[in-house]
Image (cartoon, rainbow, N blue to C red):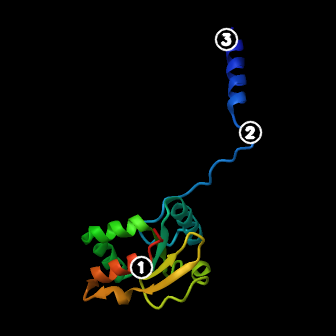
Amino acid sequence: MICSRRRIFAIACAIFVPVGVEAAPEVLPLPVKFDPSRDALRDVDAALQLAKTTNRRVLVEIGGEWCVWCHIMDRFFTANPDINALRDARFVWLKVNYSKENSNAALLARWPKVAGYPHLYVIDTDGRVLHSQDTSALEAGKTYDPAAFRKFLTEWSPPA
């Protein structure tokens, strides 16, 4: 009797397992810090997948943990929750490391040259660079200008 129950269970499982169905590709969480060990090409692909499913664009920040203005930008978004919410509602935010440990040359060779750090790229869901932004234009004193950042995010947001 026990043998037949196991056999029935095995047959039932075999019947209900779809044949030829592939598992969804694994999407790793996007980095919250600049990490030289990450594969930037893979991170961009993951960000593009997320952007497509959420009707957003990808906003890539190039920088490093060594970059003072990168940390100032992090504090700026924390101190300005309305601008942070605007960014996150319209963009998938991706940090890509640039450092002596990993310059991510394969990725950055595809895009316009970076003049300074941090640097922002706006990418559409097809992976095309729509805009390359030198962040010094968004600065105000020793931080970033909320009005300039809001204008930048609004101008480069996906169409409604």
Q: CA distance from mark 3 to mark 2?
A: 28 Å
| Kind of residue at badge 1 | Glu
The residue sitting at 49% across, 74% down in the picture is 96
Residue carrying label 3: 2
Q: Quadrant of the N terminus?
A: top right
Pointers 3 and 2 in contact (C-beta within 8 Å): no
Kindly give the residue lying farthest to the right in the view shown. Answer: 20
Is 112 above or below relative to 83? below
Q: Left or right: 51 with respect to 86?
A: right
Is 10 above or below relative to 133? above
Q: Secondary structure at mark 3?
A: helix
Please identify the quarter of the rendering in which residue 9 is found. top right
Residue neighbourhood size for the residue with mark 1, other residues' Cα within 10 Å, grouped as few (<14), some (14–19), many (≥20): few
Sequence order check: which comes first, mark 3 or mark 2? Answer: 3
The residue sitting at 37% across, 79% down in the picture is 70
x, y percentage for residue 37? Answer: 52, 69
The residue sitting at 56% across, 69% down in the picture is 125
Q: Secondary structure at mark 1?
A: helix
Kindly give the residue lying farthest to the front in the view shown. Answer: 160
Tell us which disc is closer to us: 3 or 2.
2
Residue carrying label 2: 19
Residue 155 shows which numbered tag? Answer: 1
Closer to the camera, 96 or 148?
148
Is 43 above or below relative to 15? below
